[in-house]
Image (spheres, grey):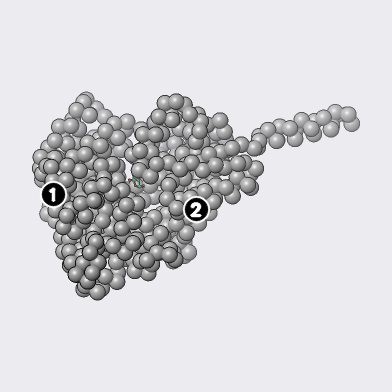
Amino acid sequence: MTSRLTRPLVGFALSFVAAAACQAATITISCGSNAADLEFCGKFAEEWGKKNGHEVKMYTPPASTTDNLALLRQQFAAKSSDVDVIMIDVIWPGVIKDHLVDLKKYSKGVESTHFPAIVTNNTVDGKLLGMPWFTDAGLLFYRKDLLEKYGVKPPQTWDELAAGAKKIMDGERAAGSADFQGFVFQAKAYEGLTCDALEWVHSFGGGEIVDKAGNITINNPQAAKALDTAASWIGTIAPGGVLNYGEEDARGVWQNGKAAFMRNWPYAWSLGQAADSPIKGKIGVAALPAGTGPGAKKAATLGGWQLAVNKYSKNVDAAAALVMYMTSAEIQKKRAVGGSYNPTIPALYKDADILKANPFMGELLDVFTNAVARPSTATGLKYPEVSQTFWDATHEVLSKKSKGADAVKKMETKLKQVKRNKW
Ligand code: GLC
């Protein structure tokens, strides 16, 4: 029995323990680098901080995922605690697995409401290293108004795209828009080119570079044909400058009303539809075209981002709580409606508000559920080298320094060296 004297002491001790458990922390989150990322990540993270008595700081990672990973690896090597919540690319879990916290203790099973394939992707050696945040797949954006003006139908094959892009480009240039482009995409030597080129290769029936069992499959005639086809666009329907374009470079040209077609990720939809966008109301979205020849089909590369907790963070519990909040259905819905970030929770694809804001999320649902994964699971820690081999050789073909057939042969030789005995 507690005496009258000890009771207040027990009360004091308990409130001390409670205060310590939710001690105010400063949490730094990496949110992405474009305007929408700041609005639709930063804002919600700050709201969470205010509600929970924590200070939230935003960290802007490099725009290119390749530069982003390089910097992150340096930070991990230094065991830096600077960024607590890290946004990680779908291809990274196997590469940075040793530096992330297992979120199972915090998620309490809620990951089962997300797409199982993404959860599997994010689970390495039984540890849940990232909560799915948004998913991506390559899409074809087109100018509805211009396709109609020139009697061009949304293309089903790359040949149709090239012909339609040429017709519109020639017409618009003749009408005085001297710098108008037919097609813009990502062809800088970086991970984004791996995404675009995997779409070309897969759509021609040329496989996935390395198959799920770890076999190197890139050296085949259909893959070579796909790369040669893409090279034929440079200087005809696409500007030479595309060889230095990332996502935002392509979107800049497109959103300025200077291109008929663009390959990009879903985020480009909400920015293009913004009140101040010159092409608001003129945008159509379709699946990317198919190639031709044996095994040809439509293909989109699977992208997407997860939220993870840095193992070297000084505030793991608070950081994990922020991850769970930001990846919740409530926040994913707000991000989808406002920023066209595709949810990772299947149930949200039936949400009327999300479908109204982003009709393509319903119309092209199969593009998202059937997207082709890059071979990051099969190649594990070696994935960055595999991807660089692929984008470098592809960039040479696009720059007309080599032909598709030589490039895929060279890739096979190099990939065998990267693989040595096994991945
Ligand atoms: C997008 C994708 C990501 C991909 C990157 C390439 O951000 O979501 O998975 O690696 O583009 O630039």
Disc ID at residue 39: 2
Q: Is label 1's Cβ within 8 Å of ligand 1?
A: no
Q: Residue 422: where, in percent of width, then height?
A: 24, 27
Please indicate whether residue 391 sits to the left or right of residue 224 in the image.
right
Question: What kind of element bears circle 2?
Answer: helix
Viewer can see residue 307: no
Q: Nearer the viewer, mark 1 or mark 2?
A: 2
Q: Is residue 391 above or below residue 337?
A: above
Viewer can see residue 5: yes
Q: Residue 175: where, in percent of width, then height?
A: 22, 71
Give me the residue at 41% from left, 60% from top. 270
3D distance between C-alphas at marks 1 and 2: 40 Å
Counting other residues with Cα less than 10 Å from the Cα at mark 1, is it few (<14), some (14-19), or many (20 or more)? Answer: many
| Marks 1 and 2, the one that precedes in the sequence | 2
For badge 2, the amino acid type reads: Glu
Residue 219 found in image quarter: top left
Give me the residue at 14% from left, 40% from top. 408
For badge 1, the amino acid type reads: Asp
Figure quadrant of the N terminus = top right
Disc ID at residue 301: none
Residue 165 found in image quarter: bottom left
Figure quadrant of the C terminus = top left
Give me the residue at 38% from left, 47% from top. 304
The residue labelled by disc 1 is: 228
Q: Residue 18: where, in percent of width, then height?
A: 70, 35
Question: What kind of element bears circle 1?
Answer: helix
Q: Residue 380: where, in percent of width, then height?
A: 31, 33
Q: Is residue 327 above or below residue 69?
A: below
Please indicate whether residue 289 sits to the left or right of residue 311 in the image.
left
For this orientation, the residue located farthest to the right is 4
Please indicate whether residue 249 sits to the left or right of residue 169 in the image.
right
Give me the residue at 21% from left, 26% from top. 420
